[in-house]
Image (cartoon, helix red, strand yellow):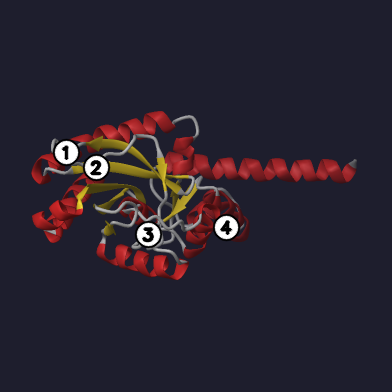
């Protein structure tokens, strides 16, 4: 009984420490370093790092890979606040989606990462008879979509492997990426160039270009895209659409 009581007490202390970290990050409203967190809460660096690693794995905490600082993770928004959060994100993005749809004549989309898959939360459809459309709320794979590649390009390699182990690399067309090494190489290109392309990888005849949307900590929280028939997208100019997407993604990031 004594051992059981000791274990319960240990678990309770760990939970309290984890909640203290969340409260600290929420109160400060800016990302904090491991040293700042451990000193603010009087925790040893090793204890703070252990707790942060566990919360990061469950997406309660996010870490900026450029400065290694920690911030509130998307999972906290998904629990209890997901509808409000996604609605706010969609509301902020809609003017940009409408503008891109008007300028290109093609459908524009907003997607987020949920449990290792993409979920579209906003869209403006093309007025043309032949067009692409997605069902809002429906989940799709990350490895064969422009928005999916963008959304996982910011993750650690181990996190990417976990997603692939869970959801696989199903081959939908002859162009679909079918190996982890090929996907990792593609994601390096995405991260470096700040855009991703799905050239008939999910569906033959459909071309999609996507760009990342960042939060204040420079963590990718969403992706916007332009999609349409391959012939039309190429006629309108891939480089022009990429520039348009990057511009609007930057503007949207700036107001979030």
Considering only order in the chain, which callout, 1 or 2, is on the residue closer to the N terminus?
1
- Along the horizontal axis of the image, is 204 left or right of 129? right
Check if mark 3's residue and mark 1's residue have beta carbons within 8 Å: no
Q: Nearer the viewer, residue 75 or 36?
A: 75
How crowded is the residue under tag 3: few (<14 C-alpha within 10 Å), some, or many (20+)?
many
How crowded is the residue under tag 2: few (<14 C-alpha within 10 Å), some, or many (20+)?
some
What percent of the width, then of the height, locates residue 3?
A: 87, 46
What percent of the width, then of the height, locates residue 142?
A: 40, 53
Q: Mark 3 or mark 1, which is nearer to you?
A: 1
In this picture, is 185 found above or below 169?
A: below
In this picture, is 161 found above or below 109?
A: below
Q: CA distance from mark 3 to mark 2?
A: 24 Å
Helix, strand or loop at disc 1? loop
Considering only order in the chain, which callout, 2 or 3, is on the residue closer to the N terminus?
2
Residue at image mark 4: 49
Considering only order in the chain, which callout, 4 or 2, is on the residue closer to the N terminus?
4
Residue at image mark 3: 153
Q: CA distance from mark 2 to mark 4?
A: 45 Å
Q: Residue furthest right?
A: 1
Q: CA distance from mark 3 to mark 4?
A: 24 Å
The quadrant of the picture occupied by the N terminus is: top right
Considering only order in the chain, which callout, 1 or 4, is on the residue closer to the N terminus?
4
Residue at image mark 1: 126
């Amino acid at each position: 009984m004594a051992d059981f009581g000791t274990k319960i007490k240990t678990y309770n202390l760990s939970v309290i420490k984890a909640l203290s970290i969340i409260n600290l990050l929420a109160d400060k409203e800016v990302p904090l370093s491991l040293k700042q967190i451990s000193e603010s809460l009087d925790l040893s660096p090793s204890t703070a790092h252990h707790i942060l690693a566990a919360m990061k794995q469950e997406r309660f905490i996010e870490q900026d890979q450029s400065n290694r600082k920690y911030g509130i993770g998307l999972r906290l928004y998904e629990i209890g606040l997901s509808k409000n959060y996604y609605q706010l994100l969609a509301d902020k993005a809609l003017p940009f989606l409408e503008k891109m749809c008007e300028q290109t004549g093609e459908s524009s989309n907003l997607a987020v990462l949920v449990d290792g898959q993409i979920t579209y939360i906003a869209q403006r459809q093309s007025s043309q008879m032949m067009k692409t459309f997605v069902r809002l709320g429906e989940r799709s794979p990350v490895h064969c979509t422009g928005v999916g590649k963008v959304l996982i390009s910011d993750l650690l390699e181990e996190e990417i492997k976990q997603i692939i182990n869970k959801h696989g690399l199903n081959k939908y067309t002859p162009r679909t990426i079918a190996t982890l090494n090929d996907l990792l190489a593609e994601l390096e290109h995405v991260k470096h160039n700040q855009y991703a392309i799905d050239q008939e990888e999910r569906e033959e005849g459909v071309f999609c270009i996507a760009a990342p949307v960042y939060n204040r900590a420079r963590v990718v929280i969403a992706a916007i895209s332009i999609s349409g028939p391959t012939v039309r997208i190429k006629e309108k100019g891939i480089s022009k659409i990429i520039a348009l997407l990057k511009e609007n993604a930057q503007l949207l990031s700036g107001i979030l």
